[in-house]
Amino acid sequence: MNKDEALIVLKAKGYKHTDKREDILDLFDKKGGYLSAKDIQFALREAYPGISFDTIYRNLSLFRDLSILEETELDGEKIFQFHCSEHHHHHLICLRCGRTKTIEVCPMQDLSRLDPEFLVTGHKFEIYGYCKSCQKALREADESINEADALHIL
Ligand SMILES: [Zn+2]
Ligand SMILES: [Zn+2]
Ligand SMILES: [Zn+2]
């Protein structure tokens, strides 16, 4: 799913095209990963001063219901990204920037034999961590902290 496909879905389902909706979809297009309602509120603060959390959340829920976005939860906060409509796969999720990477490994291939009496109808599997550029940023942040400590000791 991308912004153009999402706009087609909205139109086909009879939903009004609004600048706000398009701008929210645009953020997901540019980001290519997960965003929270708060991230979106922050990104749109200049274009739409005073845009409420509720408005954003209602649109995100609508997009999710239309399978434009998929939703998961991180530290109790709901986060969203464009629905991956291709074949079955899972994601590596960067905790710092929210970008995701597809992994082709599915643990269910090994787990499905654990309980043959249980009828599995679905599963969720996500791996959390830090992407390469965030690891670098975190290292650099750490170094400046260490340098400050060193200066303090001297
Ligand atoms: Zn995906
Ligand atoms: Zn990252
Ligand atoms: Zn799987």
Image (cartoon, helix red, strand yellow):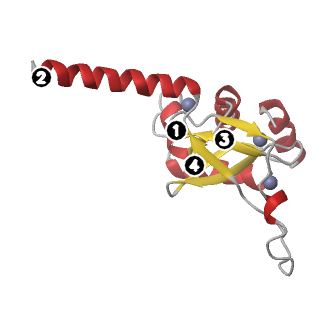
User: Is residue 68 positioned above or below 65 on the image?
Assistant: above
Please state which of the two labelled residues, at mark 3 or mark 1, is closer to the viewer. 3
State how far apart marks 3 and 1 are (Cα).
19 Å
Please state which of the two labelled residues, at mark 2 or mark 1, is closer to the viewer. 2
Q: Which mark is residue 39?
A: 1
First in sequence, mark 2 or 1: give its number: 1
Give residue 3's position: percent from left, percent from top: 77, 32
User: Is residue 150 positioned above or below 50 on the image?
Assistant: above
* Residue 81 relative to residue 57: left or right: right
State how far apart marks 3 and 2 are (Cα).
38 Å
User: How many marks are shown on the rendered structure?
Assistant: 4
State how far apart marks 4 and 1 are (Cα).
14 Å
Residue that carries the numbered disc 4 in the rendered image: 55
Mark 2 residue type: His
Q: Which mark is residue 152?
A: 2
Mark 3 residue type: Leu
State how far apart marks 2 and 1 are (Cα).
36 Å
Residue that carries the numbered disc 3 in the rendered image: 92
Give residue 19's position: percent from left, percent from top: 67, 32
Question: Would you say the beta carbon of the disc 4 residue lies within 8 angstroms of ligand 1?
Answer: no
- For the residue labelled by badge 1, is the local secondary structure a helix, a strand or a loop? helix
The reply to whether callout 3 and callout 2 are in contact (CB within 8 Å) is no
First in sequence, mark 3 or 1: give its number: 1
First in sequence, mark 4 or 1: give its number: 1
Please state which of the two labelled residues, at mark 4 or mark 1, is closer to the viewer. 1
Q: Look at the image and tell me in which quarter the N terminus lies.
A: top right
User: Is residue 9 positioned above or below 45 on the image?
Assistant: below
Alpha-carbon neighbours of circle 2 within 10 Å: few (<14), some, or many (≥20)? few
Mark 4 residue type: Thr
Alpha-carbon neighbours of circle 3 within 10 Å: few (<14), some, or many (≥20)? some
